[in-house]
Image: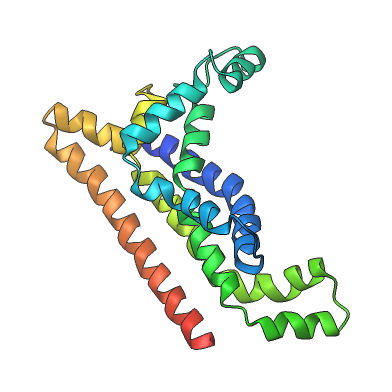
Amino acid sequence: MDFAALRVSSLLALATVVVLLPLGVWAGHALAVRTFRFKPVVEALVAVPLILPPTVLGFYLLVIFSPRSPLGAAFEAVAGQTLAFSFAGLLVASMIVNIPFVVQPIQRAFESVPREVREAAACCGLTPLQRFLRIEIPLAWPGILTAAMLAFAHTLGEFGVVLMVGGNIPGETRTLSIAIYDRLQAFDDQAVGVMAATLLVIAVATLSVTTWLGRAAGRRG
């Protein structure tokens, strides 16, 4: 087991969830309760990372992170290193890849909240923020928790974009999925088996809990 790679993967997954989840709650709620002209386009953009090949997404991220781009140049001026092939760049890439895994479950959760509940809360004098915090968040929590778990598990197993954007720097950007690839290239079947089994257990546990949450939400509705 490559514990350094496991540490990087776990830290990346945790950071992705912590940073992306609040943004996902805001975006998912907005898409669920608001109607605007370009809403279908926004929803399509949210889903793009699901169908876009990792090499294509990784290529565009490398272009955006390049020192020749405004974002890459600004980061290098502040941090003294390039955004690509750094943990910070890896985190940004991970957040982009996980957008649909976070926003879509949260959007569906808020959509399941009956409109009559919101209207009743408004009639009781609750402000929009109070309705959001006291009514909608408690009702949508299964979807929010599902989004967090999916993003965490997906980040642990992500390979293509992680390799293209972060490279393979031990202790900084080498994740468990990349370590598996390295050990496979070296014909170290035992190490590959242990690391692959670790990711498999995490994936099965995540899907099991996600299914349970979905059924619980269905019974609630």
Query: Eyeballing the image, is 146 above or below 118?
Result: above
Query: Eyeballing the image, is 137 above or below 116?
Result: above
Query: Eyeballing the image, is 67 above or below 35?
Result: above
Left/right placement of residue 85 relative to residue 88 reads left
Name the quadrant containing residue 78: top right
Name the quadrant containing residue 137: bottom right
Give the image location of residue 200, x and y in percent.
27, 54
Q: Residue at x 60, y 45 (%)?
A: 19
Q: Residue at x 29, y 50 (%)?
A: 198
| Nearer-the-camera pick, 26 or 144 | 26
Asked whether residue 4 is in view, the answer is: no
Give the image location of residue 180, x and y in percent.
24, 36
Q: Residue at x 49, y 61 (%)?
A: 104
Left/right placement of residue 88 relative to residue 22 reads left
Total label count?
A: 0
Query: Eyeballing the image, is 122 above or below 175?
Result: below
Give the image location of residue 42, x and y in percent.
54, 52
Give the image location of residue 190, x and y in percent.
15, 39
| Nearer-the-camera pick, 66 or 216 | 66
Q: Residue at x 44, y 52 (%)?
A: 47
* Quadrant location of the N terminus in the rendered image: top left
Name the quadrant containing residue 7: top left
